[in-house]
Image (tube, rainbow, N blue to C red):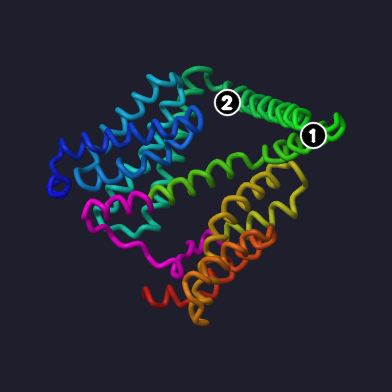
């Protein structure tokens, strides 16, 4: 493997581009854009870490352009912006930045660039008055998606031998659930981006280790925590969601804050329980199985998030004390 360890720029670039194209091809099997955002992380992150952001950016542009040739769509532009995540992460890992900070910067960069692109696109294509029309069009497209999904569920139920009333009830259930998700679509989208970036960062870190690189090691799961301001965001979201009238601006902001912060604090609370179980002498296997079983209980999401809030305030693992 000396040809890999040699860090020849053009060799690394060719390898990363080939691996990225192969992984994008696999991602296309899951849909037009499918797992592309996740699968493109390891080669781009590793290339940027080894050769710098210029090579990483060039590979990202070529991958996005190649995908556009296969599936022509304006979505190639935000895809390119999302590929800024692995490029930025590889650049920051090279500087030995903390992994939590790298993840936060990556997500903020992807969200910020995407919002900037959407704002410029609406402004240039529809003018100042086009924002409301674009938002309405997006809502209508989402509702059309919900209607078609419900129709597919009804047809599938009928094909499976269900009665007409039962099939209609199943379709209506899906339609109601999808409609209920509409107010929190922004938070769900950012949450998916956070999960995608976290998994991509971990897989890219693993790829670097396979290439005989020495990036900053991943911290033990029991020491994971969220920034204290996220607990404040959770409490603010909780207050807005329950105290403001339903479907008002404050209520919707609270719902989105609550959804996004709860997803991260869930991991925080899980890490706290994982560390506590380790202190009790439980083996790693039992801790992993126990945490996985706990997540199968619906109410555990709220419980773990609340534990994350409590630990943010009390620092029960003394993590901030150790850093000091």
Relative placement, left or right, of 291 versus 223 is right
Measured in 3D between alpha carbons, the distance from the residue under mark 1 to the one under mark 2, in whole angstroms, is: 31 Å
Q: Position of residue 269 (x, y in %)?
A: 56, 66
Q: Which quarter shows the C terminus?
A: bottom left
On residue 24, the disc is none
Which residue does the image show at 54% across and 75% down from the upper left? 314
Query: Disc 1 marks which residue?
Result: 172
Q: Position of residue 240 (x, y in %)?
A: 69, 53
Query: Disc 2 marks which residue?
Result: 131
Which residue does the image show at 77% across and 45% down from the upper left? 246
In depth, the one of 172 and 157 nearer the eye is: 157
How many labels sit on residues?
2
Residue extent of the magenta highlight: 202-231
Q: Nearer the viewer, mark 1 or mark 2?
A: 1
Residue 70 seen: yes
Q: Residues within 10 Å of mark 1 (few under 14, many from 20)?
A: some
In depth, the one of 271 and 115 nearer the eye is: 271
**Residue 289 vertical placement versus 8 (above, below):** below
Which residue occupies the extreme bottom position in the image?
280
Residue 269 seen: no
Q: Secondary structure at mark 1?
A: helix
Which residue does the image show at 16% across and 37% down from the upper left? 11
């Amino acid at each position: 493997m000396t040809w890999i360890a040699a860090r020849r720029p053009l060799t690394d670039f060719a390898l990363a581009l080939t691996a990225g194209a192969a992984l994008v091809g696999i991602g296309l099997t899951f849909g037009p854009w499918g797992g592309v955002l996740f699968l493109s992380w390891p080669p781009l992150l590793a290339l940027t870490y080894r050769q710098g952001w210029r090579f990483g950016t060039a590979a990202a542009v070529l991958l996005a352009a190649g995908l556009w040739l296969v599936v022509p769509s304006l979505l190639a532009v935000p895809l390119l912006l999302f590929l800024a995540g692995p490029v930025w992460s590889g650049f920051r890992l090279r500087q030995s930045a903390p992994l939590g900070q790298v993840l936060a910067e990556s997500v903020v960069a992807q969200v910020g660039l995407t919002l900037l692109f959407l704002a410029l696109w609406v402004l240039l294509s529809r003018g100042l008055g086009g924002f409301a029309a674009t938002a309405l069009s997006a809502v209508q497209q989402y509702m059309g998606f919900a209607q078609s999904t419900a129709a597919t569920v009804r047809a599938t139920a009928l094909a499976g031998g269900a009665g007409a009333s039962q099939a209609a009830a199943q379709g209506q259930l899906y339609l109601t659930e999808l409609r209920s998700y509409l107010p929190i679509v922004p938070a769900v989208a950012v949450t998916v981006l956070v999960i995608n970036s976290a998994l991509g960062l971990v897989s890219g870190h693993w790829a670097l280790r396979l290439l005989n690189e020495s990036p900053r090691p991943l911290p033990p799961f029991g020491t994971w925590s969220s920034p204290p301001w996220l607990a404040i965001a959770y409490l603010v979201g909780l207050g807005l969601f329950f105290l403001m009238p339903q479907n008002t601006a404050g209520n919707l902001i609270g719902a989105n804050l609550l959804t996004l912060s709860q997803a991260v604090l869930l991991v925080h609370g899980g890490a706290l329980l994982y560390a506590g179980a380790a202190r009790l002498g439980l083996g790693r296997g039992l801790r992993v199985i126990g945490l996985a079983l706990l997540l199968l209980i619906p109410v555990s999401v709220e419980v773990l998030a609340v534990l994350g809030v409590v630990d943010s305030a009390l620092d029960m693992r003394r993590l901030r004390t150790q850093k000091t």
